[in-house]
Image (cartoon, rainbow, N blue to C red):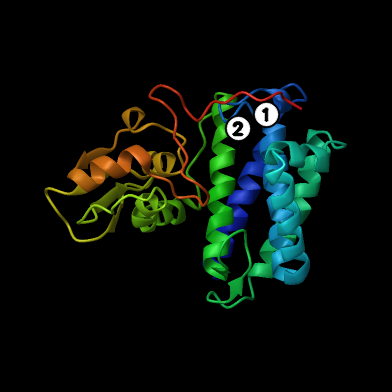
Amino acid sequence: MQQTCDDLIGEYRALADFCATLSPAQWRVVTDFYGWTPWDEIAHLAYFDDTALQSCTDAEAFMAGVKALMAEQGQGKEISAIARETFGHLDGAALLAQWRQRFETLVAQLRPLDPKARLPWYGPPMSARSFATARLMETWAHGQDIWDALGQTRGASPGLRHICHLGVTTYGWTFVNRKLDVPQPAPYVELTAPDGSLWTWGEPSATDFVKGPAMDFALLVTQRRHRDDTALQFAGAGAEAWSRIAQCFAGPPADGPAAGVRTRARPQPAA
């Protein structure tokens, strides 16, 4: 749990430090993720880090908040609009300062927990370790949208292996979530880490595998890149099918970007 929290806080701080360099105009640049701006991306993270902290400290209040959020979404309100209503009085710098305080407090709450402790969330309760990993993945993915929009290349991520592991372990869920049969066997996954070492999952196979850069795999399973825009190699029916619908985040089935498009584009009015 300590290592997971170390990597989580590293991911948070790396993104916050990058956003601290943004000019007022850059906070309003439109990203390829549903037309959100960097401000929207951070507001989204701040909203759910607020509720994550509440999950850790007041489960009853958290569940009441879930009910209220579901009611708003049931009336057709987008989560981006809800985040804008919540934080719209803050400019980028003020939003960033508030988010920093929240994520530092959240990680401090997570650190002493038993990794298997259950925390309520927007579906089944999650183990504390999975909860922290999910926050890491979401932070990394939304951060990638900002790096992409500003034409910047991010450095090696402290949480990259966690995201790849989450991607591998959601192989079956990706298909079940779409009410599809899960192809067997699950492919062997061999990824090259930023330092040149290999990360592997499953039994080596010459006929069923996914191989390539760990960064590209993380971009694929978080739906930030189309498979054709990565250096990944695929073999076998399972790997081929998975590579077209991979989804390591919760929620209903989502379509990843088309080839040549970095992330999903569905323009919404910028706040």
Q: State the CA–CA distance, disc 1 to disc 2.
A: 8 Å
The structure residue drawn at horizontal position 50% and vertical position 39%, both measured from the top left corner, is: 155
Residue 121, percent from left and from top: 62, 62
- Amino acid carrying mark 1 in the image: Thr
Secondary structure type for disc 1: loop
Dot 2 corresponds to which residue? Answer: 146
Q: Which mark is residue 122?
A: none
* Closer-to-camera residue (176/266): 176
Q: Residues within 10 Å of mark 1 (few under 14, many from 20)?
A: many
- Where the N terminus falls, by quadrant? bottom right
The structure residue drawn at horizontal position 76% and vertical position 54%, both measured from the top left corner, is: 68
- Amino acid carrying mark 2 in the image: Ile
Secondary structure type for disc 2: helix
Q: Nearer the viewer, mark 1 or mark 2?
A: 1
The image quadrant of residue 20 is top right
Residue 127, percent from left and from top: 54, 70
Q: Which mark is residue 37?
A: 1
* Closer-to-camera residue (189/249): 249
**Residue placed farthest to the front in the image?**
75
